[in-house]
Image: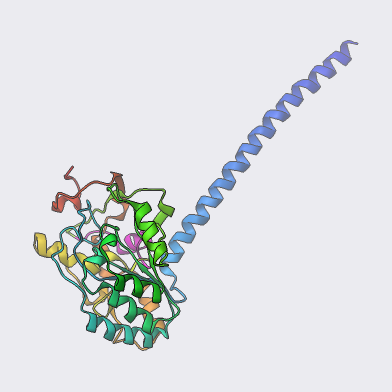
């Protein structure tokens, strides 16, 4: 009987050990699975930076350089840009050449700024873009403040050229229900970024005026590189900063130098692959980007138009 009791207690004790072991093993498996998922996502992120796209998935084009909002640390520098609009005739010339090089294979055109609705000819750009890119999506990226003021011709051109209105929600007094009804009445899609659930937040994009950052690290860790491709005056840029840094330099003095190798001309390439391969590699300007310090700084807030919004250390709260 005594031996049976020992045997039984041993079973119970071993059973508890096994249960604890199974629990720990299960937790370890879960942690390993989560680690694998994180590693895969990280690897995928970096590979997408240095892998040429099959075609231009996304192309951002400024119709206006300035903006009617005043956002902290805008990565297009629109809050400090002087009033300037894209020339329609030059734009059409560039569209003809781009269509020739790409054979019309561009996924999405984001017509934006700045605030694109500040451009008096905004809706003309719908027609030109659609004329040369019949298969592409055309998005009008706007803060929405001027949508209610657009005339019938604007809505007619938006509808006929299958333009999507793609606003970002800012903490502003905008009657989105009224704008939605206006879009519905004109048969123009209204689609919010982040499905309209999240309002705009502010970010600090720290730049290094001395240009001591590692180009490769900056490029492969940049969320915009080889993704938010900019098209400006016949040239493609792999991200927003080199395309629009001119506004910072003009406002605060020449600080960040541009190189001819920071962009590529659509008039000087032999084929589409030249463009795609260029966009998938670091550029000289990457040396200015302290990507490791880029971070959100809370809810959307207005800019004080202080250069330290982009520099390390002092910040304009």
* 189 left or right, relative to 287: right
Q: Residue furthest left?
A: 253
Q: Quadrant of the N terminus?
A: top right
Residue shown at 87%/10% (left/top)?
2
Q: Main secondary structure of the magenta part?
A: loop
Q: Nearer the viewer, residue 260 or 147?
A: 147
Up the image or down, 300 lies above or below 279; here it is above
Residue shown at 16%/70% (left/top)?
84
218 within the magenta span: yes
Q: Residue furthest right?
A: 1
Q: Nearer the viewer, residue 137 or 292?
A: 137
Q: Nearer the viewer, residue 187 or 252?
A: 187
221 within the magenta span: yes
**Res. 275 in view:** yes
Residue shown at 80%/23% (left/top)?
11
Q: Quadrant of the C terminus?
A: top left
> x, y (%) of residue 4?
88, 15
Q: Residue furthest top?
A: 2
Up the image or down, 50 lies above or below 205; here it is below
> x, y (%) of residue 237?
29, 72
* 304 left or right, relative to 7: left
* 279 left or right, relative to 259: right
In the rendered image, which quarter is residue 143 located in?
A: bottom left
**Res. 230 in view:** no
In the rendered image, which quarter is residue 167 located in?
A: bottom left
> x, y (%) of residue 252?
10, 59
Q: Nearer the viewer, residue 141 or 46?
A: 141
> x, y (%) of residue 287?
25, 63
Q: How many marks?
A: 0
The magenta stretch spans which residues? 211-226
Q: How is the image coloured?
A: rainbow
């Amino acid at each position: 009987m005594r031996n049976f009791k020992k045997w039984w207690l041993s079973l119970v004790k071993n059973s508890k050990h096994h249960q604890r072991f199974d629990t720990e093993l299960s937790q370890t498996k879960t942690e390993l699975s989560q680690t694998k998922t994180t590693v895969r996502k990280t690897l995928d992120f970096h590979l997408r930076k240095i892998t040429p796209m099959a075609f231009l998935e996304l192309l951002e084009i400024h119709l206006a350089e300035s903006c009617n909002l005043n956002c902290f640390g805008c990565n297009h520098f629109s809050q400090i840009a002087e009033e300037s609009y894209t020339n329609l005739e030059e734009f059409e010339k560039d569209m003809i050449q781009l269509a020739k090089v790409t054979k019309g294979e561009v996924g999405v055109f984001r017509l934006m700024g700045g605030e694109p609705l500040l451009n008096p000819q905004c809706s003309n750009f719908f027609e030109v873009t659609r004329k040369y890119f019949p298969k592409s999506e055309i998005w009008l990226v706007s803060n929405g403040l001027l949508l209610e003021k657009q005339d019938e011709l604007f809505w007619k051109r938006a509808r006929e050229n299958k333009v999507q209105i793609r606003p970002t929600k800012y903490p502003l007094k905008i009657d989105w229900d009224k704008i939605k009804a206006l879009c519905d009445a004109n048969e123009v899609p209204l689609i919010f970024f982040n499905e309209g659930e999240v309002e705009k937040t502010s970010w600090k994009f720290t730049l290094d005026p001395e240009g001591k950052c590692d180009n490769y690290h900056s490029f492969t860790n940049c969320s915009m590189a080889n993704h938010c491709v900019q098209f400006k005056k016949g040239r493609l840029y792999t991200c927003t900063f080199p395309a629009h840094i001119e506004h910072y330099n003009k406002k605060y003095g020449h600080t960040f130098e541009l190189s001819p190798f920071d962009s590529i001309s659509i008039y000087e390439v032999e084929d589409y692959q030249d463009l795609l391969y260029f966009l998938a590699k670091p550029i000289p300007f990457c040396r200015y980007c302290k990507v490791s310090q880029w971070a959100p700084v809370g809810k959307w807030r207005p800019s004080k138009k202080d250069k330290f919004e982009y520099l390390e250390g002092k910040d304009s709260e």
